[in-house]
Image (tube, grey):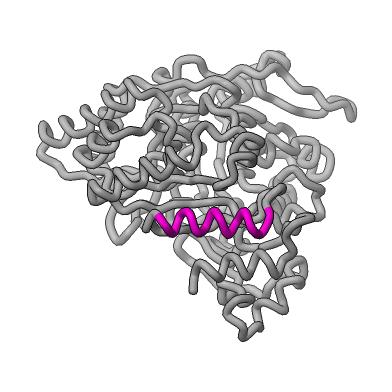
Amino acid sequence: MIVRICFINPPIQDFYSTSIRRQPIGILYIIASIKSAGHNVSFINCHSPKKHKLPIPNEFSYLDKYISNSNPALSFPFKNYYHFGLTFQEIEKQIKSTDADIYFISSLFTPYFQETDEIIHIIKRLNPLSKIVVGGYHAALYPEYYLRNLDVDFVIRGEGEQSSVQLLDSLINNKDLLKVPNLVYLVKDEIIKTGKNNIRDINTMPFPSREFLKERDFKMYRTRAVSMITSRGCPNRCDFCTGRIIWGNSYRVRNIESVLSEIYECIKQFNVKIINFEDDNIFALKSRAAELLKELYNFQRIHDVGLDFTAMNGISIEQLDEEILNLMKQAGFGELNISLVSYSEQLQKIYGRPFNSQKFADIANIAKDLGMNVRSYFILGLPGQTKEEIEDTINFLKSLDVKVFPSVYYNVNTHKDQWKMQRSSAFFNETEHLCRDDLFNLYNGIRY
């Protein structure tokens, strides 16, 4: 039986975007697994470099006083609100041409749920008999929303590779859906959740199907780049992290030989110059970190290539020291992205941070001495923070003479009415200690 399968990566609407979102590595991994199982797949990557300006939605009306504010301390840092990617008219045209039997749609980030919703509405209108499967962080958090409100057929609430393959097998061959892991669906208005079961050996997975990307999707920093992961999960238990929703509590690493083989494929097939590692915690094990970095260096010498390595998702520093940083620099890491979250020792304990401020300072200073570009991050507006604590955090980071970037706190565990505003660009969440004026004052105090 031939089944037409289509994957869709939705566009996004926001005040800003980044090119890294055009390489949906999670979707590409699942496509590769489905192809390996013998199925034909199409892919609509709706997130493209195209953008067009939109009126700012009514949900952001609370920002009006800041958007028009001439006071630099209270001015909104973004000029316009945009639709990034294919228009919904273009998406509708592509969906119509696929005429797929089963659609897999990503719902990764909570504030962009409406973009996913619109794609679901288009499919329902054009192909009402097709099956719709939704996965990603937001779908895993709120499966009932998709099943009850949007009449989606299935939600995958964990890793999607084996779940998608087994789901297709069950649908095609009329097998028991209860045996498909990480699945949520409705039976006579009853929510059915199957057991969670992620892949134990991630080395068994085929490389992501990057051949489905367009030339435009490889452009980053005016050169060619790919995103890659060498591990899944994180052994830490930071309270605000949502990674465990998909990856579970385990930390699984790939064989270094497999990582190097994927890098070689990306060089030969896609002519890339930058490898961006998107691991949640790429250097969680010091011995593996040292081995990986040494092999990355040796790989370039053997193949006579020069690569830039980055980890824009950030590197957790608990296993970093002078040895690892030297190996990073030698291997080709010119930049170090690290997050303190908060200078407060009390908040570090409350939120389960695996290192303290002194460790952070030590790592930043060593990296600077090695000539690395150190980009430091902290969370602005974290529940429990006071204005004084944030000022202490900013002053501490500035004293290290590193670049400082605030990430405005957002909360995805909230009511649907607030989903759209849960993004760093929205300055939405006020606390008992911080009003919105405080957030803007502190944010802009770093910029000016």
Left or right of residue 331: residue 31: right
The residue most toward the right is 189
Q: Magenta includes 232? A: no
Viewer-proximal residue, 335 or 203? 335
| Secondary structure mostly taken by the magenta-highlighted segment of the chain | helix
Provide residue 418's location: percent of width, then percent of height: 78, 55
Provide residue 69's location: percent of width, then percent of height: 65, 83
Res. 136 visible in picture: no
Q: Magenta includes 387? A: yes
**At x 22% / y 44%, what residue is drawn?**
307
Compared with 141, 127 (above or below) is below
Provide residue 325's location: percent of width, then percent of height: 28, 37
The residue most toward the bottom is 70
Left or right of residue 151: residue 104: left
**At x 84% / y 39%, what residue is drawn?**
148
Left or right of residue 15: residue 65: right
**At x 72% / y 19%, what residue is drawn?**
194
Viewer-proximal residue, 223 or 97? 223
**Residue range highlighted in magenta:** 386-399
**At x 66% / y 23%, what residue is drawn?**
182
In which quadrant is the N terminus drawn?
Answer: top right
When asked about the image quadrant of residue 118, the answer is bottom right
When asked about the image quadrant of residue 176, the answer is top right
